[in-house]
Image (cartoon, rainbow, N blue to C red):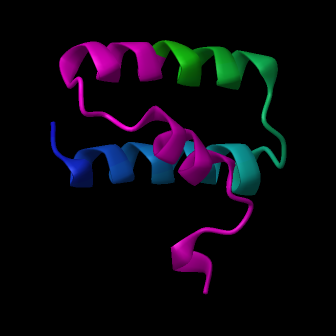
Amino acid sequence: MTGKDYELLAGVLNYQFWKEHKTATSLGWAIVNNLVRTLKDDNPKFDAKKFIAAISATKRKEDD
């Protein structure tokens, strides 16, 4: 996977948490944590903190 792929995934998750459901549920974060572990296994250079920050942001770039 590439950085663009990771950004795409983060954007989708961000949209679901903040636009569709208006909250980040515990199930949602369990999915994110599992996804982060999987992506790190796939790519040791994967930046989990950056990925989670992109999901956690309450305003997406596309919202500007």
Position of residue 63 in the picture relative to residue 12 (left or right): right
Position of residue 41 in the picture relative to residue 36 (left or right): left
Residue occupying image coordinates x 46% and y 33% = 48
Q: Is residue 61 magenta?
A: yes
Residue occupying image coordinates x 31% and y 23% = 39
Q: Position of residue 60 (x, y in %)?
A: 60, 68
* 29 and 50: which is toward the camera: 50
Query: Which of the 4 quarters of the picture holds residue 26?
Result: top right
Position of residue 9 in the picture relative to residue 13 (left or right): left
Where are the magenta residues, as a range?
Answer: 35-64
Q: Quadrant of the C terminus?
A: bottom right
Position of residue 4 in the picture relative to residue 48 (left or right): left
* 21 and 61: which is toward the camera: 61
Depicted 37 relative to depicted 54: above or below: above
Query: Which of the 4 quarters of the picture holds residue 31?
Result: top right
Residue occupying image coordinates x 36% and y 53% = 7
User: Please, which residue is most extreme toward the bottom here?
Assistant: 64
Q: Position of residue 15 (x, y in %)?
A: 61, 53
**What main secondary structure does the magenta stretch of the protein show?**
helix
Q: Position of residue 8 (x, y in %)?
A: 35, 52
Residue occupying image coordinates x 70% and y 43% = 17
